[in-house]
Image (tube, rainbow, N blue to C red):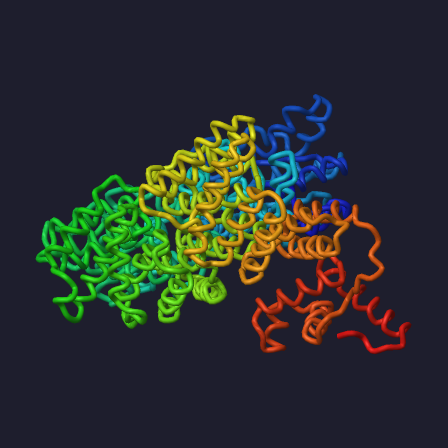
Amino acid sequence: MLLDRDVELDLAATALRSGRGALVLVSGPLGVGKSALLDGIGALAAAQGALHLRVSAAPMERDFCLGAARQLLEPALRDASPETLARWTAGDARDVLDAGGPGGAAPSQAALDGLTALLENMARDQPVLMLVDELQWADPATLRWLRQLSGRTSGMPVLLVCAVREGDTLTGEPAVQEVIAQATHTLRPGNLGVAETGELIRRYYGEAPDEAFTAACHRVTGGNPLFLSCLLADAAPRGRQPTADQAEAVAALRPASLQHRLLPRLGMQSEQVRRVARAVAVLGDDTNPELLSRLAEVDAAERDEALRRLTDLGLTTGMQRPRFVRALVRSAVVEGIPPEERTAMHALAAESLHRAGRPPEHVAKHLMALTTPTYPWAAEVLRAAACAAQRRAAPELAANYLRQALMGSSPDNDRAELLIDLATAERSFAPYAAVRHIAQAVLLCDGPVQRAQAVVRLAPSAFSSTLLPVHELLQETADALGPGDRLQGADRELALRLEARIRQSALSDPEQLADSVARLVGLGGAPRTDTVAERELLAPLISAATFSNALPAHEVALLANRVLDREPALPAHVHTTMPMVVASLVAADSVERLGAWLDAVQENAVGRQTRVEQALIGTEQALVSLARGRLARAKEQALAAFELGGEKHEEVFTVSSMTLATCAILTGDHQLADRLLAVKYRAEDDPYVWSGLAMLKGQSAARKGDLDGALGWFLDAGRRLEQCGWLNPALLPWASAAAFLHLYLGEHQEARKLSALEVERARAWGAPGPLGRALRVYSHMVDGPGSIEVLREAVDVLHLSANRFELCQALLDLGERLGPADARGRTALRQAYAEAVVCGTQWLGHRAEELLAEAPPDPQATRGQLTPSERKVAQLAASGLTNQVIADELNITCRAVEKHLTNCYRKMSIPGRGHLSTALGELDRQSDSSGAAAPY
């Protein structure tokens, strides 16, 4: 499987063809493929009819006089015919078979001359290729003969190729160097390139690897053939196929086979080299010459000589900051250090780095290798390292540091602080463990203030899923601290933040819900939002008003936007009560400023967000897309968050699942619904989760023809929400779904009653999206002309909404009710088609097209009467500019750009942006042919 060695093989082939003797040296570090290159040269010899002689010297045979020489020659002598053997051993070569043996004196010159004569006799029959692998391990007598032979090959067709390992101790021996000095050519094969790495993987697996898999293998091995072969040998039995999704997994492997190949080679080095190699492995990137000498217990000269040896071997790089060339090489060396010695080295490294004032994470890495860090400063260093890891969005590493610090801590305030810090890190990836550790910390805290400082670290997103009594823990802590209106400064902030979490945890209690609304009203129309605590408290209070439908949407949106205006757009907001503000603004159909704020959060989160934060922010963005009627985009965002969080992160999993459930319900995506229903949710008793799943189960039952069962699920969802006092139809339109089923079952009175209830509640709420949806559904419950009037009201209301999907549905219903023969019906259908294009709801667009196809010709219809603003926006969009660029150029909002484009699509009866250029050209031609100014 020789790859990327064409230059070396060409040189060897030329030497063979020349018929003149030569000594070719193959030199290089460990694993670069010297033996494989000898294999390739041997294949050339066979192809060109040369006699192929080969030996691989071994350390245990160095005491066998002429042992390597005999292994080189004896196979050919053994296989030769009697006639050939007699010819080869004629003259001075007659006693050659008696030369050499174990131990004894050095061979006589006559014995060496006899070996040379034997080779000369062989060369008279055919060219001879002699391959000597691992030259540095050959016995002294063989080395002496090869040195003499290399001076006499020029006159005979003998090509001697010797492979020697750079950096080996024996390579520097005079006898080896004397042979090397006679070389006429030197070949130094390098590591494989990416393409050759991919070819080696293909040959190994029998199929072409994905580019990402190849790149990962090349990155971790550097193209070193030995490292790569060991990696692949470890990957295949583990089921790591050469696909893109396995790239990172294979890159993380640390093959044991490499350790088995590497450690014996290091074992042949001097004691100083071995100690320095171990010290470099333990120190990693923290090394420096002085620390390395101390850890390896060598002086400067011994250290530098050892580093040169390791560098020549191809294992390390650099002298001032030496490190192993690849992480998998370092891992192999580390694993080869006896545990007791490794622990002692890490302890010494930690102490030395700490005394030198190195960054905490550098010291902590070595403290992590100790069973229990006993240094009095260890906990402080590990805690500082955890803070540094948190700042660079590595909470799991931070938690590891803190757990190690806890191993050596005592049950006092320091332990409580460590538990609090650990819980803060864990809330990003293990929320239930975080709750448990806060509960443990509270028992160790000294006084109500420290207990409050611990409890406010809890992430409200985990409240509904944990089995621990969070509400009681919050309430007990708040009672001990005292009411916020009696406190000042930092204590008041703690009290307000505790109150915020208590109120969020009690949102499903009708009495507490009403009390929260009263608390909000008591704060007045312009409550303070200056501090974190004030904003955190307002979030659940605003949510209480939203869920209970106690305040109109415009008041809720005003309060929520006041909070948003003062809240920094940072990813850490997902661990506070701020997501409740996001939910309230979505319910209030007020997402213009919210969308911009979340975009800023996303921008600020680059490189600073954890996996959980990324998924929760993605879910919030999906909610905004839903509020805008962008169902395809919402599904894409929610699905990405769902898969990013995974079942391991329950709070992300639950929130994204419920967002996906809404997408499945609105789009009728049965496969998605079934996928969500197949999941076991830890927070299934949460009212919103339970009701959302009930809606999915009802939809599934209806799809299977069980209308009574489906109706039962929808009504159960509504009852569960109402038991909590959640009366806002913006949360879950269960009444609409139940009303339609009543209608299909012939229960017209029940259908109209339920739908009217939703309209009444939606009017009280006042957000255009939920109200327009409720009116559209109610129009199906009304007979006669009144139905059209209700639909017209729904369309008028929805023109004020950000939700283009709901507007599209209302326009489609109105156009279908009026009929395509009616001019107003055709207008509604054209508008519905344009909105369907914007929303990406193809099924609604197809329905509008089908109805429009039934319409009679309309010669009186005006087409393309664009306003100047619409015309300008259309021209810019046709030129390829994005909505944001257009908005910036015209100094308007993106929403205004979207509205102008929607009007253009409707007026020109085109499906979308791709048709703008053609439609504008047609308008220009119509204007020129009429001889009149264009009506825009």
Q: Is residue 897 above or below residue 273?
A: below
Quadrant in which the N terminus appears: top right
Quadrant in which the C terminus appears: bottom right
Residue 19 picture location, percent across and down: 76, 45
Residue at the (26%, 56%) spot, across then down: 516
Residue at the (51%, 32%) spot, across then down: 747
The image quadrant of residue 555 is bottom left
Any part of residue 208 in sight: yes
The answer to which of 608 and 352 lies nearer the viewer is 608
Q: Is residue 140 above or below residue 764?
A: above
The image quadrant of residue 359 is bottom left
Residue 520 picture location, percent across and down: 28, 62
Total marks shown come to: 0
State left or right for residue 869 relative to residue 216: right
The answer to which of 574 and 353 lies nearer the viewer is 574
State left or right for residue 332 relative to residue 769: left
Give the residue at the far top of this rendering: 82
Residue 608 picture location, percent across and down: 40, 61
Residue 188 picture location, percent across and down: 60, 53
State left or right for residue 462 relative to residue 242: left
State left or right for residue 240 relative to residue 485: right
The answer to which of 337 and 758 lies nearer the viewer is 758
Any part of residue 137 in sight: no
Q: Is residue 226 above or below residue 177?
A: above
The answer to which of 56 and 312 lies nearer the viewer is 312
Q: Is residue 85 above or below residue 255?
A: above
